[in-house]
């Protein structure tokens, strides 16, 4: 069986006149777009425009719910209950689903943003709240979760199709978690280093952590951050490297569309 991987990118994170990322240049290079829903970034007009742009390139639509923290870009931890997490995800996924429907389309997946994502990796009660919120809005949506994590297992337990996510531009800790952005070694800025990590994850099912240890990971979807410098170069280089390695680039298969909520 041929190897394949989905390429996803966080998008639609501009707000009013403030512009974030290189969405229009990155969109032709990816297969899935995680679109901000207005809590950590984005606004109604940006959501509409990003959905339209993604559809024009045949890119799968995803909701990218985050914490209500515009000034911190959703990357600061907040003390929230599972019920609060559930409510904010329901509202954001519902809003993005409505934007997609207004353009004759529908959502394919949900991926939590920033601190909300990382908090759910560490706190399984939050992970369950996020997964149940997605399921209760539309149980055919694919849930993007940190590869080989308990967060992914929780989402599977509530009945969702899960895409195990790996990262092209982030380093890993020995427990399989991402290195916190507060540390200098958190981001990978050299495309060649990134390519080696990507090919290791996709072809070998493992990644080398910052301490040199090897961590097993399942790679269904690969995240490329559109807001980092050189994002377009990263995306082009990685896409070419995958092609050269005989690895197909295509979206993750959606869940059962016949049983939507």
Image (cartoon, rainbow, N blue to C red):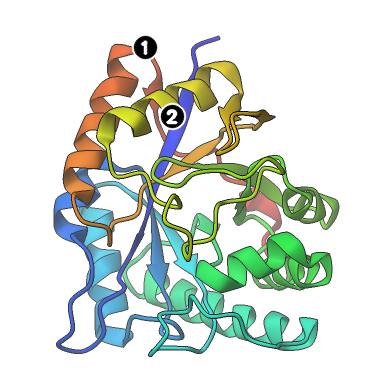
Residue 74 in picture, x, y percent from top left: 47, 79
Determine crowd level at label 1: few under 14, some 14-19, many 20+ residues with C-alpha closer than 10 A: few
Judge left or right: residue 242 versus residue 81: left
Indicate the position of residue 99 as horizontal and vertical percent values.
38, 76
Q: Secondary structure at mark 1?
A: loop
**In the structure shown, which secondary structural element does the residue marked by tag 2 occupy?**
helix
Q: Residue at x 57, y 85 (%)?
A: 91
Q: Could you say where residue 155 lies in the image, as x and y percent from the top left? A: 76, 55
Precedes in sequence: disc 1 or disc 2: 2
Q: Is residue 107 left or right of residue 157?
A: left
Q: Quadrant of the C terminus?
A: bottom right
Q: CA distance from mark 1 to mark 2?
A: 13 Å
Viewer-side label of 1, 2: 2
Q: Which residue is mark 2?
A: 198
**Residue 131: mark:** none
Residue pointed to by mark 1: 246
Out of 49 and 19, give the one closest to the viewer: 19
For image coordinates 67% across by 31% down, the residue present is: 215
**Which residue is at a point 70% across and 66% down the rendered structure image?**
120
């Amino acid at each position: 069986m041929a190897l394949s991987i989905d390429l996803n990118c966080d998008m639609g994170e501009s707000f009013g006149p403030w512009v974030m990322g290189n969405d229009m240049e990155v969109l032709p290079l990816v297969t899935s777009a995680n679109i901000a829903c207005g809590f950590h970034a984005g606004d109604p007009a940006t959501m509409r425009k990003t959905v339209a742009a993604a559809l024009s390139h045949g890119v799968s639509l995803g909701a990218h719910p985050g914490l209500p923290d515009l000034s911190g870009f959703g990357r600061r931890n907040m003390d929230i209950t599972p019920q609060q997490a559930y409510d904010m995800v329901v509202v954001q996924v519902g809003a993005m689903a409505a934007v997609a429907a207004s353009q004759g389309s529908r959502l394919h997946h949900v991926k939590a943003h920033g601190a909300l994502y990382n908090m759910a990796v560490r706190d399984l009660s939050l992970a369950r709240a996020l997964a149940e919120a997605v399921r209760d809005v539309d149980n055919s949506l694919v849930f993007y979760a940190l590869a080989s994590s308990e967060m992914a297992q929780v989402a599977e337990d509530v009945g969702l199709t899960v895409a195990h996510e790996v990262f092209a531009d982030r380093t890993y800790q020995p427990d399989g978690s991402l290195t916190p952005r507060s540390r200098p070694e958190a981001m990978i800025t050299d495309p060649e280093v990134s390519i080696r990590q990507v090919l290791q994850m996709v072809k070998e099912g493992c990644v080398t952590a910052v301490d040199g240890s090897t961590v097993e990971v399942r790679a269904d979807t690969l995240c490329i951050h559109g807001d980092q410098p050189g994002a377009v170069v990263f995306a082009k280089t990685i896409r070419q490297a995958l092609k050269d390695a005989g690895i197909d680039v295509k979206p993750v298969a959606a869940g059962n569309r016949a049983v939507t909520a």
